Image (spheres, helix red, strand yellow):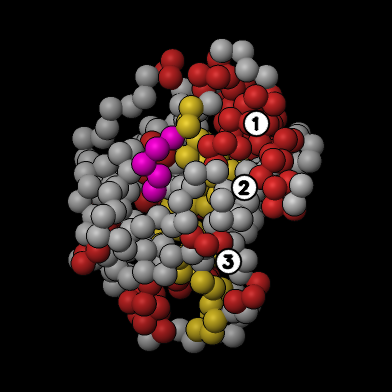
Amino acid sequence: MTATEEVMQLGLADRFGRVATDLRVSLTDRCNLRCAYCMPEEGLDWLPKPELLTDDEVVRLVSVAVTRLGVQEIRFTGGEPLLRRGLVGIVARTTELTPRPEVSLTTNGIGLARQAQALKDAGLDRVNVSLDTIESDTFVQLARRDRLKDVLAGLDAAQAAGLTPVKVNAVLMRGVNDRQAPQLLEYCLERGYELRFIEQMPLDAQHGWTRASMVTADEILEQLSDRFDLEPTDAATRGSAPAESFTVRGGPQTVGIIASVTRPFCGDCDRVRLTADGQVRDCLFARTESDLRSALRSGADDEELADRWRRAMRNKLPGHGINDPSFLQPTRPMSAIGG
């Protein structure tokens, strides 16, 4: 057996030699914001509760990924994962696995002020918080909820609890917050947060995304460079990280730009996703899913679940194809997929 064949047998490898070691686990499709680049103002039809994985089912599948498939990093996502009542317990049980994975959380920050210390005590390593503006009016325009103070309080609480480095994810929308990048970076620098700008991707439920309206990575970099002295960090240390990183004012603080659309990094992708209803997605933009929930509930043992997961990854495409004229958005929006 060759080394490649061995990886295909034992890990989450695809036909192109990529091995998934980073698992994103959606705990719910529900959210308490209605961000314009994600879902309509009236919300969506949420998954029925019987279709959602239970806490025990989540932990079991995560355990299979870590102990049998070589997954090293677990990121809990949503929707909004802080809405999951069993979140702290799920985190605690995940950090007790051997080998212990790195465990993080992507959140909109609402409710984080109340839960940050409990999550830290459960073993959570760090958080990524979505924050697209520090202007109250703009926040309401983008999120359709007046909750900016709650998000900022959540960031402060995460820092105080030691969930560091606290990372901030920002999406710029043309005509809304597209000129606020320098202001947002200054805010994060003052507080020691790591800011990353993400190009808007075609994952909105309304399917209203257009390339022409998207604020590109080059535009963001140009805007920041007008205000800050930026220098690229060593590209050799980037690995599979999606963000192009720049030191600010000589460092050590940095800012990242994730050019998912204009400079895809699919060739280095090491991610796999598990939806809140137990479906494996080999790519954020996949048009197909592989069902683990049914096998799990039908009595499959851990090795059968692992084998199903391996087979699900082997058909992963070489890239997401956003720049191909034949590209079609996933049927599910970001809130149902998990980021």
Q: Which residue is mark 1?
A: 306
Q: What is the quadrant of residue 228 in the picture?
A: bottom left
Residue 107 placed where, x, y %?
A: 48, 45
> Who's the residue at 39% across and 48% down the image?
285
Q: Is residue 79 left or right of residue 207?
A: right
Between marks 3 and 1, how big is the CA–CA gap?
A: 40 Å
Between marks 3 and 2, how big is the CA–CA gap?
A: 36 Å
- Count neighbours of disc 3 (C-alpha within 10 A) and say few if under 14, some if 14 to 19, many if 20 or more: some
Name the residue type under label 1: Ala
First reached walking from the N terminus: tag 3 or tag 1? 3
Residue 158: in magenta span: no
Q: Is residue 78 above or below residue 293?
A: below
Name the residue type under label 3: Gly
Label of residue 13 in the image: 2
Between marks 2 and 1, how big is the CA–CA gap?
A: 12 Å
Name the residue type under label 2: Ala
> Who's the residue at 41% across and 62% down the image?
260
Q: Which residue is mark 3?
A: 192
First reached walking from the N terminus: tag 3 or tag 2? 2
Residue 125 placed where, x, y %?
A: 67, 48
